[in-house]
């Protein structure tokens, strides 16, 4: 039976993918200046749930997946990699590229902290 974190990960990933597809189709990233903010927040949240799902499925050790510093470093690496990918694909350097990139990473990390706190509380409530 799937654990709650796994079900929530699949839901969050589906919502993130659907919103991203819609945003690309309707050019929302270019027309609505703030649209990427909730996407980065949801992205950080989703990745943390994914890490906990990997631990639930015994793919990564639970101690590794639940240590805050490990999760933080994974999220930071993924956020930086995403920004490099985004820069490489668009090849358009905006005026405020550095501040936009730093805020995107910070927002992704914020989503990760929220996701980490949420998943830890969820796991604690399932144990009792």
Image (spheres, rainbow, N blue to C red):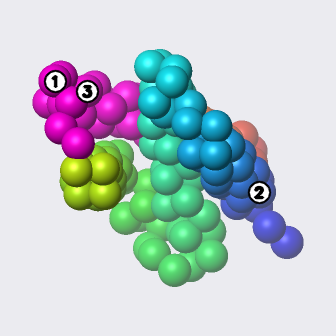
- Nearer the observer: mark 3 or 1; the answer is 1
Q: Secondary structure at mark 3?
A: helix
Left or right: 125 in relation to 64: right
How far across and down, in percent of the image, does residue 127 sit? 71, 50
Left or right: 46 in relation to 104: right
| Numbered badge on residue 7 | 2
How far across and down, in percent of the image, does residue 85 sit? 29, 57
How far across and down, in percent of the image, does residue 21 sit? 64, 50
- What is the span of residues highlighted in magenta in the rendered image? 92-112
For the residues marked 2 and 3, what is the alpha-carbon distance in whole angstroms? 32 Å
Front-lying residue, 54 or 35? 35
Q: Residue at x 56, y 31 (%)?
A: 28
Q: Residue furthest right?
A: 1
Marks 2 & 3, CB-CB < 8 Å contact: no
Prevailing secondary structure class for the magenta stretch in the rendered image:
helix
- Look at mark 3 in the image and give the residue it sits on: 100
- Look at mark 1 in the image and give the residue it sits on: 95
Quarter holding the N terminus is bottom right
């Amino acid at each position: 039976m799937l654990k709650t974190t796994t079900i929530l990960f699949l839901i969050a990933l589906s919502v993130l993918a659907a919103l991203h597809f819609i945003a690309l189709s309707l050019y929302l990233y270019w027309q609505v200046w703030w649209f990427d903010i909730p996407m980065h927040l949801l992205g950080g949240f989703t990745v943390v749930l994914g890490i906990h799902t990997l631990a639930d499925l015994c793919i990564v050790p639970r101690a590794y997946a639940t240590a805050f510093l490990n999760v933080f470093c994974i999220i930071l690496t993924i956020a930086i990699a995403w920004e490099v990918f985004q820069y490489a694909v668009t090849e358009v350097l905006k005026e405020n590229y550095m501040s936009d990139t730093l805020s995107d990473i910070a927002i992704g990390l914020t989503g990760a902290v929220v996701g980490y706190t949420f998943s830890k509380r969820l796991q604690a409530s399932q144990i009792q």
